Image (spheres, rainbow, N blue to C red):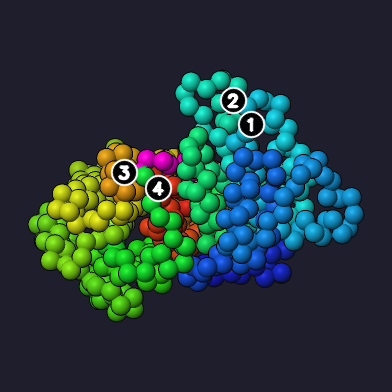
Amino acid sequence: MLDAWTELGRLPLTRLMFKRIGIKTPPQLLRAFRPWSDDLLHGKQVLMNAAGPYSADLKKALGAQKGLVTFVKDESLNVGESKGALTRIAAYQGTVFDSTAFQNVAELDQLFKFFQSHLKQLGFNHRVVILIKEWPGAAAPEARACARAVEGFVRSLAKELGAKGTVVNAVQVPEHPESAQRLAPIVSFLLSDHCTFVTGQILRLSTLAELAELPPLAGSLAGKRALVTGAAQGIGYAICRRLADEGVHVIGVDRPQNRQALRELASNVDGEALEADLSLESDLLSLVDRLQNSPAPLDILINNAGITRDRSLFAMEKAQWDSVLQINLKAPLQLTHQLLHRGLLANGGRVICLSSIVALAGNYGQTNYGTAKAGLIGLIEGLSTHLARQGISCNAVAPGFIETPMTAQIPFVAKQFARRLATLGQGGLPDDVAEMVCFLASPSSQGINGSVLRVCGGHILGS
């Protein structure tokens, strides 16, 4: 939940007061707060350029999710020509632009014409997805320049539109006969209200693993088994609850000190509670032994447990360095290795590690934390290649400032500053992270592998 100060800022009188002293009131974000459905887009009207190579396939896929797609054939259309035209454009909740055919700089003008004509008239909580061609290393320099240019456009447009709660993301599409099939569920998710706090991101479509059957998103996780570490509170708790909403059997792991909260979680989601102190190798191995006696292998592994011991490197004690590296990096590495070595993760499974924006941008006083969380990114990059032949995908999620009981203890001024480092002008919710984790755990995410997805509201720092 947002704190009382943020809620207070939404009142008309305090909104005016904040404006006068230079504090911008963040937009109200539209979130789903419900399980996936067969009509993921719920009648959303989506605007799309007609000339893109993937436009026809996407129109069909989005229509299957009950999205109402309108092709724009004249990119120079001036929506301000009449009040009626402006009203029609304002009714759209999503926009898809396919730039994968761009090969020369002159074609970038199409971006300017399309978005200046349409997007500036759109309302709050709009969703924009831009497709970018992934060119091989031997491609013409100008073609690669075009693709990079579109990436810059995406990041900058996200900054411009964040004040309206609008998110802008891109998918980098390789030349591959199965790209359209892998792409469709990802675009659908990015256009939905389940993807609210992700903006300014460039997702790379992966073709590492063979294309498996793509069931509808709704019900695709029913009956799966997931292990979630650090499950008793904060983001871990939200992940467990969200997975359970989709029919996953959740096995929550947390340290003995959180026994009561862990048991309550297991009761609430009709799952299992396993106590283990991941700083102790004996506890970790005991945990794997217990899992080996389970009736079925795991389908999903979520390495979420983490701690902070913040201090400048000059003042940091060795114990503070060791404890953070152990819990945040060594334990996930060892747990993942043990589960794979013993065959406890099923073919077609998912490995998801919770990294951090600190791994990408760095932060004062967090050399230990940044080191460990960046190490997790390297881990999933390495695993993704090795496990692709088993259909197992490995990804990392990097949250930004998320409103949790831990961040609630941050001093007021520092907290306001941290929130406004995001393009969306606010902190995210644990549910925002849980939504992305849950999607990555699904069969629909098989086009994402070896990636780092930032759930940070468009944080101004980091790669």
Frontmost residue, 246 versus 218: 218
Q: What stretch is highlighted in magenta?
A: 202-209
- Give the CA separation, mark 4 to mark 2: 28 Å
- As drawn, is 335 to the left or to the right of 356? left
Question: Is 203 inside the magenta-drawn segment?
Answer: yes
Using the rendered view, name the quadrant where residue 273 is placed: bottom left
- Residue displayed at 58% across by 61% down: 64
Amino acid residing under circle 4: Leu
- Give the CA separation, mark 1 to mark 2: 7 Å
Frontmost residue, 410 versus 46: 46
Above-or-below relation of 227 to 377: below
Q: Are marks 1 and 2 in contact (CB under 8 Å)?
A: yes
Q: Which of marks 1 and 4 is in front?
A: 4
Of the image marks 3 and 1, the number of the one nearer the N terminus: 1
Return the residue found at the far right.
Answer: 82
Q: Which SS class for mark 4?
A: loop
Magenta: main secondary structure equals: loop
- Give the CA separation, mark 3 to mark 1: 30 Å
Of the image marks 4 and 2, the number of the one nearer the N terminus: 2
Q: Which SS class for mark 1?
A: loop
Amino acid residing under circle 3: Ala
- The residue pinned by badge 1 equals 102
- The residue pinned by badge 2 equals 143
Q: Are marks 4 and 2 in contact (CB under 8 Å)?
A: no
- Give the CA separation, mark 1 to mark 4: 27 Å
Q: Nearer the viewer, mark 4 or mark 2?
A: 4
| Percent position of residue 195, x then y | 53, 58
Frontmost residue, 418 versus 157: 157
- The residue pinned by badge 3 equals 388
